[in-house]
Image (tube, rainbow, N blue to C red):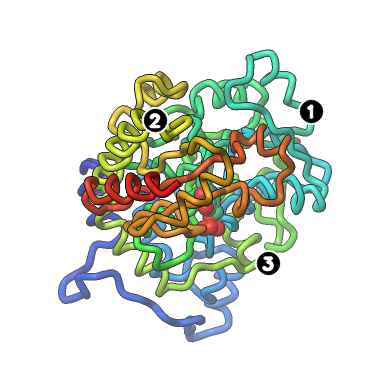
Amino acid sequence: MSDYKIETKCVQAGYTPGNGEPRQIPIIQSTTFKYDTSEDMGKLFDLEVSGYFYSRLQNPTNDMVAAKICALEGGTAAMLTSSGQAASFYSIFNIASCGDHVVSSSTIYGGTYNLFAVTMKRMGIEFTFIAPDCSDKELNAAFRPNTKAVFGETIANPALTVFDIERFAKAAHAHGVPLIVDNTFATPINCRPFEWGADIVTHSTTKYMDGHAAGLGGCIVDSGKFDWMQYPDKFPGLCTPDESYHGVTYTERFGLGGAFITKATVQLMRDFGSAQSPQNAFILNLGLESLHVRMKRHCENGQVVAEFLNQNNRIAWVKYCGLPDDSQYTLAQKYLPNGSCGVVSFGVKGGRKAAEKFMMNLKLAAIETHVADARTCCLHPASATHRQMSDEELKIAGVSPDLVRFSCGLENAEDIIADIQQALNKI
Ligand code: PLP
């Protein structure tokens, strides 16, 4: 499958049926798996052999879908999680614990910011948030001896900044830590962060990958390239024996390609249990089969809508990296040459009140927390996803109080534009 183009992988990777087997991925709706002897099962618990024993850790349907996403991203191993939040949490907590520190881009999804700045802080992990366009001096100054990772979003939700993956990967590696990239908005169709030096990729598969607002989910993919063994003191969880598995050392037993995901599966999934249901994994796979077709249309609609808004005198500003006058255009040309996503952020003249009135009058586009869906939807982040942030924090996250996040679906662009126009006329 590795020689095939990404479109073919979307449709076929992850599962190859044998003679007489189901054409579609089977949903293994079973919490548990049967063995002939306790000894057989003991070998699984000792990680001596691979196999399934309880779906909180691993399930065959989930693994087939994870294998497809792994192939799309060009990684060595992957796992599904119950949500994008769980993926973000595991990706950090797998290598950082109480007393550690992480450098994160300041323009990230509000839920991730909350997870990092509030919940994980309570767990003793400190985050330094830096602007994605910070100077090299500021970037290097953000690292500490106890820094364990760098985190950013390929296309930030909802600030729509484009993350300079290559630059941040170089900085992370110079300080002996991996770069983790949330690739939710771009999807591997438009950007594959491993090709630019990222080490771990995360997804909220709830968004474009599922694409139909049908199933919540997340995914973590490992590039297999980060050499944990070069820094055994920094990453003891991967490089020293795990007493909860009779002294297994993940890097030794599973190699660089498998250590990170195996540890996250057998430790974090075992203990926190944020497993995706096999039903949701099946639904996710249906979405993945058409991801390449849908992303193209989302991007076309996003571009047309952004151009329309950019020329409309009722609009104060527009943010879309496909617009030549956008501050992110140059970075987008580098990382997203075939398109970015269908999400456009803009401000309506008249500020927050005008934005609320505009949204209230939309007919086709629905007000939803959701984004990156087949149906056009929109959100006022300052009132919703970013509600917990102070004005100062909003500014740092690239979210102005008048920002409308508009997620172009798969409808005819003329209908989306007509809907926007009629709602603007009513302000
Ligand atoms: N990452 C990004 C970029 C997101 O937009 C979201 C949700 O909107 C998440 C992570 C969290 O994903 P989920 O809602 O699936 O938990």
Query: Residue 70: horizontal and vertical position, in percent?
Result: 39, 49
- The residue at 33%/45% (across/down) is 421
Give SS at disc 3: helix
- Count of numbered tags: 3
Kindly give the residue lying farthest to the left in the view shown. Answer: 19
Asked if residue 95 is positioned above or below residue 68 in the image, the reply reads above
Label 3 neighbour load within 10 Å: few <14, some 14-19, many 20+: few
The furthest residue to the front: 426
- Which numbered marker is on residue 271? 3
Q: Earlier in the sequence, mark 2 or mark 1?
A: 1
Residue 313, disc? 2
In this rendering, would 352 be left or right of 115? left
Nearer the observer: mark 2 or 3; the answer is: 2
Name the residue: 60% across, 25% down.
Answer: 173
Residue 145, which numbered label? Answer: 1
N-term-proximal mark, 3 vs 1: 1
Give the camera-side residue of 168 and 43. Answer: 168
Secondary element at image label 2:
loop
Residue 217 in the image: state x and y as whole percent: 48, 62
Mark 2 to mark 3 CA distance (whole Å): 54 Å
Q: CA distance from mark 2 to mark 1?
A: 51 Å
Q: Is residue 173 left or right of residue 335?
A: right
